[in-house]
Image (spheres, helix red, strand yellow):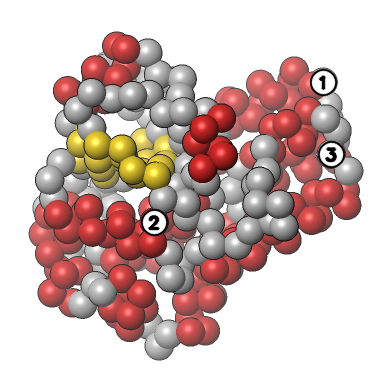
């Protein structure tokens, strides 16, 4: 869903301003059979720790979200707990398949505020690259996502901290499972840069930085096409195509993938 002035989640047009980073529904994309993803069924974004009661009510009763799937690790989720929704079911299954030696993950904002050195950036980027290479495989978080999608028992929201990396790979896979064009799935992934731009600009302004350090910050606070290409290339190296990949990794044969398209496209 492209950004525009009638986006009901930004407060610019109608609806309500949702205090959720990178929040959007996945809709409007056409698959190879000419079917278009329906609006307001599959949602993605960042953590739900900043929501108000009014926003939570809109989340559950207007958007009819019934399943929340949190891709963060235990420590991340504990530090910024999701809003305790009265109706929607919450599950947390860590999606990152590679771990640092201390298993503590990264707080990109904290690292940036403390003054990031080029060597530290290089280390973090290598960590992220390895994550992109491995997340599509043997991932119980994504397996659960597809299970919920097939279950079709209510609208779904999946997220990580900022809704860009772990959530970005998940969104890409959801679109490919429903036979969307690969380039459209990449474009949807890259939308995070638009949705996160204001927050990134605000942080850069607060820190009063410019030039090289600003570029270093943006490489962590946004998404990069070469990262999602790492996921794509990893799939291509291991499997002959997406049909083989989805059936082997997620048990999604052609019948189940057609079922997904029937539910979420029109």
Depicted 121 relative to depicted 205: above or below? below
* Residue 245: percent from left, percent from top: 36, 78
Q: In this view, does 143 lie to the left or right of 186?
A: left
Q: What residue is drawn where x is 72% and y is 57%?
A: 101
* Residue 116: percent from left, percent from top: 84, 39
Q: Disc 2 or 3, which lies upstream in sequence?
A: 3
* Residue 263: percent from left, percent from top: 12, 54
Q: What residue does disc 1 label? A: 208
Q: Disc 1 or 3, which lies upstream in sequence?
A: 3
Nearer the observer: mark 1 or 3; the answer is: 3
**Nearest the eye: 65 or 209:** 65
Q: In this view, does 249 lie to the left or right of 266?
A: right
Label of residue 74 in the image: none
Q: Disc 1 or 2, which lies upstream in sequence?
A: 2
* Residue 258: percent from left, percent from top: 14, 68
Q: What residue does disc 3 label? A: 116
CA gap, disc 1 to disc 2? 38 Å
Q: Are marks 1 and 2 in contact (CB under 8 Å)?
A: no
Depicted 87 relative to depicted 238: above or below? above
Q: What residue does disc 2 label? A: 141
Secondary element under disc 2, as helix, strand or loop, is helix
CA gap, disc 1 to disc 3? 14 Å
Quarter of the image for residue 230 reads: bottom right
Q: What residue is drawn where x is 22% and y is 53%?
A: 148
10 Å crowding of disc 1: few (<14), some (14-19), many (20+): few
Secondary element under disc 3, as helix, strand or loop, is loop
Q: Is residue 29 left or right of residue 218?
A: left
10 Å crowding of disc 3: few (<14), some (14-19), many (20+): some
Quadrant of the image containing the N terminus: top left
């Amino acid at each position: 869903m492209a950004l525009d002035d009638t986006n009901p989640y930004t407060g610019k047009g109608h609806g309500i301003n949702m205090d959720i980073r990178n929040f959007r529904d996945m809709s409007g994309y056409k698959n190879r059979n000419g079917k278009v993803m329906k609006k307001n069924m599959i949602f993605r974004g960042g953590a739900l720790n900043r929501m108000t009661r009014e926003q939570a009510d809109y989340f559950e009763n207007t958007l009819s979200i019934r399943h929340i799937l949190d891709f963060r690790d235990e420590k991340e989720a504990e530090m910024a707990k999701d809003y305790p929704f009265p109706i929607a079911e919450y599950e947390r299954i860590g999606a990152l398949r590679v771990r640092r030696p201390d298993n503590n993950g990264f707080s990109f904002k904290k690292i940036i505020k403390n003054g990031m050195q080029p060597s530290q950036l290089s280390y973090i980027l290598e960590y992220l690259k390895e994550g992109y290479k491995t997340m599509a495989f043997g991932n119980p978080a994504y397996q659960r996502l597809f299970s919920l999608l097939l279950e079709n028992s209510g609208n779904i929201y999946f997220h990580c901290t900022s809704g860009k990396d772990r959530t970005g790979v998940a969104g890409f896979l959801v679109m490919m499972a429903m036979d969307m064009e690969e380039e459209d799935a990449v474009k949807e992934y890259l939308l995070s840069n638009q949705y996160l731009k204001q927050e990134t600009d605000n942080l850069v302004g607060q820190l009063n930085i410019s030039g090289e350090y600003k570029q270093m910050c943006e490489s962590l606070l946004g998404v990069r096409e070469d990262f999602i290409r790492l996921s794509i290339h990893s799939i291509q190296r291991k499997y002959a195509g997406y049909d083989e990949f989805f059936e082997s990794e997620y048990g999604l044969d052609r019948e189940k993938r057609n079922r997904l398209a029937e539910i979420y496209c029109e």
